[in-house]
Image (cartoon, rainbow, N blue to C red):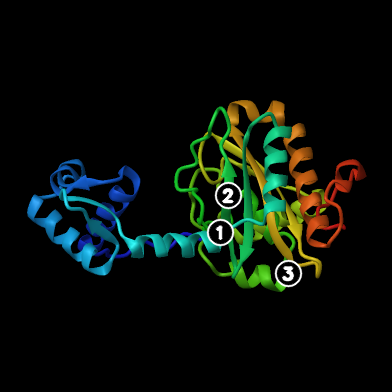
Amino acid sequence: MSVPETTTLSTLERGLAVLEYICEHGPANAKRIARDLGLRQGTCYHILRTLAVSGHVARQPDGQYEPGPHAYWVARQIQKRVAVVPELSVILARLHNVTGGETSYITRWQDGAAILQHYLAGTQATNVGKLEVGFGGDLHARASSKAIIALLPGDQVEALFKGVKLAQLTPATITDYEELLVELAQIRRQGYAMDREEFAEGVQCVASGFVSPDGTPAGAYTVSVPTIRFAKLKPTLVAAVVEAAAMATRFLAGKRPVDAVTAGRHHPGQP
């Protein structure tokens, strides 16, 4: 869920901006970094020296900076956290293909967060703002997280949301606890969840959750499309995510995922 805004450390923000710039744009000297980020050169040099001492960046003989060994270590730790089992990646690729190349996601349920692990961008990529690999917030507004949470016992749902302020991300976001419970009950009945511009305006999503062998939620598959195309595509998208979730559930249970293709199961929690 969204964390209320608090006082931030501007020095840390500038340091992170410099590190992100170097990671995204490759080797660059202090003058270029300062210019592109709107920093004073003296401030930029100070930040770069600090990052170099910590190993987050490395200064080359020609004066340019590139990611340092500690930046790569951080990247490896993040990759471990969001790594996708190859078989589940194959199911994601199938989902992407079955929907005609629409933007498709796999999300993992971990430590009370629905963490986006990987996605395949569509040919008409949707802009979903802060939704990037590793994101795990706003559980009440995302189709993926609602699909997962609908599979949780009622006491766990209550622990997650009761008495908690639900941030209104768009005019369509559900911000009432009782209304959210009604939504989750509907998701359990139909086997899939929808995001009707609740997370980002102009984008709608459909998702279906898959479970571990012990019946606990493990994750979800999601497809997102622009609102203007959603109504026409909805039946295809629903069928595709439900199939993907059923395949994942079968794989985690040690069964052949492909058998779910012809099984025609409606609810992803069934083996």
- Image spot of residue 186 (x, y percent): 76, 51
Find disc 2 in the rendering and name its residue.
118
Q: Quadrant of residue 219?
A: bottom right
Find disc 1 in the rendering and name its residue.
82
- Image spot of residue 229 (x, y percent): 63, 26
State the residue in front, 31 or 200. Answer: 31
First in sequence, mark 3 or 1: give its number.
1
Left or right of residue 228: residue 155 = right
First in sequence, mark 2 or 3: give its number.
2
Task: Bin the neighbour count of mark 3 within 10 Å (Cα to Cα): few under 14, some 14-19, many 20 and up.
Answer: few
| Residue ID at (64%, 62%) | 109
State the residue in front, 41 or 144. Answer: 41
The three-letter amino acid code for the residue at tag 1 is Val
Mark 1 secondary-structure assignment: helix
Residue lying at the far right in this picture: please name it: 263
Mark 3 secondary-structure assignment: helix
Please identify, in this view, whether the residue under mark 2 or under mark 3 is nearer the observer: 2
| Residue ID at (68%, 72%) | 156
In the image, residue 48 sits, relative to residue 265, either above or below, namely below
Find disc 3 in the rendering and name its residue.
154
